[in-house]
Amino acid sequence: MQRKIEGGVFEIELKSKSKDEIGLLTNSFQKMSRALGIFGRFTNKEIALLAMRGQIKPGGLPKHATIFFSDIRGFTEKSEIFTNEFGASASDKIVYWLNDYLSSMVDCVEKTGGTIDKFIGDAVMAHWGTATTSGNPRIDALNCIKAALMMRLAVVKLNKNRNPSDKGNPEINIGCGINTGMVTAGQIGSEQRMEYTVIGDPVNLASRVESLCKPLAADILISEDTWLLVRDHIICEEMQSVQVKGKEKPVRLFAVINHLQSKQKPFTLADVRKLMNIKPPDTDNVDLNAEEKNIKLVTIKSEVTKKIKINKGALYEWNAAAYPSAGCQCKY
């Protein structure tokens, strides 16, 4: 039993037929086992194991990690529909619907060796190369991409089983943002509450990349730092570069299409948009999230600079001189 718990099998059924000290000890062991099982669900099973073994210690460590963010497109609007349709029972229905989706996403992360950091409402934050790692940043980055592609297929499968007229089980579309870099990983918090997480500029950029999925009409976007690690294995299409506040050079972005060796669609970004029911972007009316008001899109065609109205009339320069390869399919 001890070896099972040390191996990560927290919830063990034990039956005691006696009422002596052995019986009391068995019941106590059963309660401890259930408590560990709950702990593993509320945090992360792998983190729980490492913490139990004393392998996660106070303080931070530098890690060359790949960071992942995703969220559900139009989640706020969907939440309002739940409330309007189901009233007092809306909370139960939306949690059931959300947990069904999140269960599939967690499965994709865990099968590829990733660590779930946290759920932020409908958003998922995860990372590879931190608490556990392949030992190679390239493999960790590729595993993250594999997880995102698995999520894409999982969402397609979930949506196939939905009835369009069922307002209690609406279709889901997601956006995923991925970036790789040196982060600080460790237990952060107070003596009363701590969590294993990652901090640093690469984390912030991964979140920003995710927020650009909607205006750029892509479901999986990766930064150049990630692309450089996976380009030998993944089909990508280069998108508009992004000028992020605080960075001197524009950040190149790539839409993930498929595994390079795949013999089935999608082979192009157009294929992805058709599969995921994503409308092509209206480049004359690019709409960035409010948090991205410090970002400039830099397109990659000619030396003509356009001004694009974003949100409430704010003007952003869209410089068309940066990279001649925009929109090309990057196969290596």
Image (spheres, helix red, strand yellow):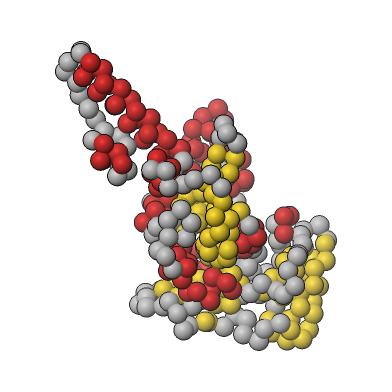
View extreme (top): residue:
19
Residue at 71% x, 62% y: name it.
287
The image position of residue 300, as x and y in percent, is 68, 81
Q: Is residue 92 visible?
A: yes
Determine the image quadrant of residue 87: top right
The structure residue drawn at horizontal position 26% and vertical position 21%, both measured from the top left corner, is: 25
Numbered disc total: 0
Task: Give the quarter of the figure containing the N terminus.
Answer: top left
Task: Find residue 306 and report its image quarter.
Answer: bottom right
Residue 180 locus on image (x, y percent):
55, 66
- Classify 271 as above or below 330: above
Report x, y in % for residue 81.
58, 41
Q: Along the line of sight, which residue is nearer the eye, 326 or 222? A: 222
Q: Is residue 31 left or right of residue 306?
A: left
Residue at image location 32% in from the left, 37% down from the top: 10
Q: Residue 30, how many percent across, how many down?
A: 29, 26
Does 209 sit left or right of 109 as displayed?
Answer: right
Is residue 97 visible from the viewing direction of this image?
Answer: no
- The residue sitting at 80% across, 68% down in the picture is 316
Residue at the extreme left of the image, as rendered: 17
